[in-house]
Amino acid sequence: MPETSSIQEYSIGNFRPHSLAQGNRNYLWVTTSDKAIIRVHPGAGSNQMVVNHSMIPQLSAGIIKDPDGLQRVWFAAPAPPRQQDPIVIMETSGTNPVTYYPLEDDAKAESIKLRTTNHGTAETPNYEYSLLFAEPEHKYVGILTPAIGGHIDRMPVSQNTWLWDVTVTTAADEKTHTYWATGQSRASNPVRAENGLYRRRPGDLQWERIEVLRPNQKPFYVIADTTAVWLTATNPNQIIRLDLNSLTTRQQDLNTAVPQQLAFGPDGTVWVASSEGLHEFDKNLTGGGSLVRLPNGGGAKGLCVAADGKLWYTNPERKSIGCYDVPPPPYGAASLLGRTQFVYQGESEVRMKDQVAEPLVVDYVANGRPVPGIPLTCRIDAEGAAFEDGTHERVIITDQRGRVALPPVIAGDIQEEAIISVGLGDTEPHVATTLNITPA
C-alpha cells in the first residue's frame, strides 16, 4: 500500500469543506458548508484567504473554473428552503463580487459540470460553453449558457427520484450530446422512491433508466469520458464503470469505504474519494486498485487535479484539505503522464492590434484516450501579444472530450513572433505554435 508521506494536509480553520477547483493564477478555491469560500495557494497550503462577505451562500457545493479562463469560478449552492441561490459566479479578484442565477424559490443544486459545443466546423471551430446542474426539488437537469445571457434550458426527469449529479458525453461531431444523471430514493419530504442512473440521448424528450445498480443500491457522483461513464454508489459501496459502446458494466467493491467524488488523473487513471482515503483504478477498472489512507484520519470528499498534476482533496471531518503527490509505479499509475497534442491551429499570421479568435485547440491524451477535467496551462511568450484580458498565462480545464480551446489572442503594436504553448504545468513538454505579428 502507498505511504502517506507524499500527502500534505492543511487546516482551513472552522470551515467544513465540500469541493475544490483550481482557478486563475493557479489558486485553489474551496466551497464550504459555512458561508465561506476559501482561497488556497497551491504551493503553500497554509497560505489562505477566506471570502465570507454577505453574498456568499450558506451552503456551497460543486465548483469549476470558468471555462473561458476568466478570473472567476462557478459553484453550486444547495439552498435551504425558499432561498434562490443554486448557481453562483464569484470573481476571483478584487472584493470577490458574486452574481446569482436564481431558479425556483426552493431550487437546489448539488453539482456543476461543463459542456462544450462546437457551433462551427472541424476546420473552423466555434466553441460555446454551458454549465450543467441537477435540480432535485423540481426534477430537472439544467443547462445554463453564459454566452446567451445566462439562459437556462430545463430537461425534466419524470422518474420518481431525487437527482444528485449529472455529466455529459459528446459525439465526435462535438455538437451532439448525451446526458447522464444519478438519482436517489429519499424517505423525507419530498419522498422519492427510486435509485438510478438515467440517460437522455440526442433527440429524446424523456430520460431512460440504465440498469447498473443492485437492488436498493444508491448512486452518488458520476463522471464520463469518451469511453465510459463512472459512478460511485453505496449499499454496497462500489465504483461502477459503464462502457459506452457495449453498455456492459464492471464494478469494484470498496468494502467499508463509503465513496464520494471521482476525478480523472492526468495519467488516465480514475481516482475516488472515500471515507477511508483515496482510491486509484486503471482506465478499464481491472484489478482492485490501490488505497492511500489520509495521514490524520477523517475521509476525503471532493477531488481535483491541479496544473502540476498533484491530486487535491477535501476532508470535511478534519476541516482540512490535502495534497497528494502521486508517486511513480508500482503504487502510482501504470504509465507516465499523458500528453497534450494539436487538434486545430488558427491563423499563423496576424497584423498588429488585430485579434485571433481561435488561436489553438488541443486535447490531452493518456493511455490512448482524451481525458476530461485536466487543468492545462496556456501561455503566450510575447512582448506585445496577450490574451484578451491582457494576461499571458491562463489555466483552462479540458472539457468532456478532453479538449481546451484557447481564448482569443490580441496582437500588440510590436512586430514579433509570439509563442503560444499549452501543457500540464511544467510536468510535460508543452505543444507550441508561432503567431507572426506583422505591421498593420
Image: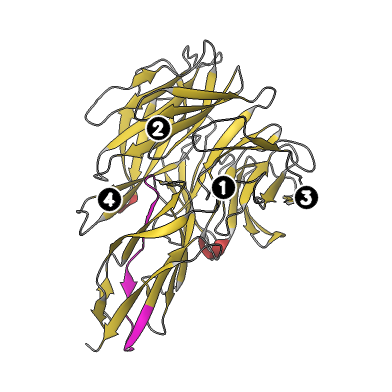
How many angstroms separate mark 2 from mark 3 (CA)? 47 Å
Is 239 rendered above or below residue 387? above
Q: Which mark sits nearer the N-terminus, 2 or 4?
A: 2
**Residue 145 coordinates in the image, percent (x, y):** 32, 47
Identify which amino acid the numbered label 3 is placed on. Ser
The answer to which image quadrant residue 345 occupies is bottom left
Residue that mark 4 sits on: 148
The answer to whether the residues at label 1 and label 4 have Cβ atoms under 8 Å apart is no
Q: Is residue 430 left or right of residue 435?
A: right
How many angstroms separate mark 1 from mark 3 (CA)? 19 Å
Nearest the viewer among 181 and 281 is 281
The dot on residue 5 is 3
Kindly report which numbered mark, 1 or 4, lies closer to the viewer in this rendering.
1
How many angstroms separate mark 2 from mark 1 (CA)? 30 Å
Q: Which mark sits nearer the N-terminus, 1 or 4?
A: 4
Query: Which residue sits at x=73%, y=42%?
Result: 2
Query: Which residue sits at x=75%, y=36%?
Result: 298
**Residue 195 coordinates in the image, percent (x, y):** 48, 17
Work out whether residue 236 can be spotted: yes
Identify which amino acid the numbered label 4 is placed on. Ile
Residue that mark 1 sits on: 304
**Residue 66 coordinates in the image, percent (x, y):** 44, 54
Kindly report which numbered mark, 2 or 1, lies closer to the viewer in this rendering.
1
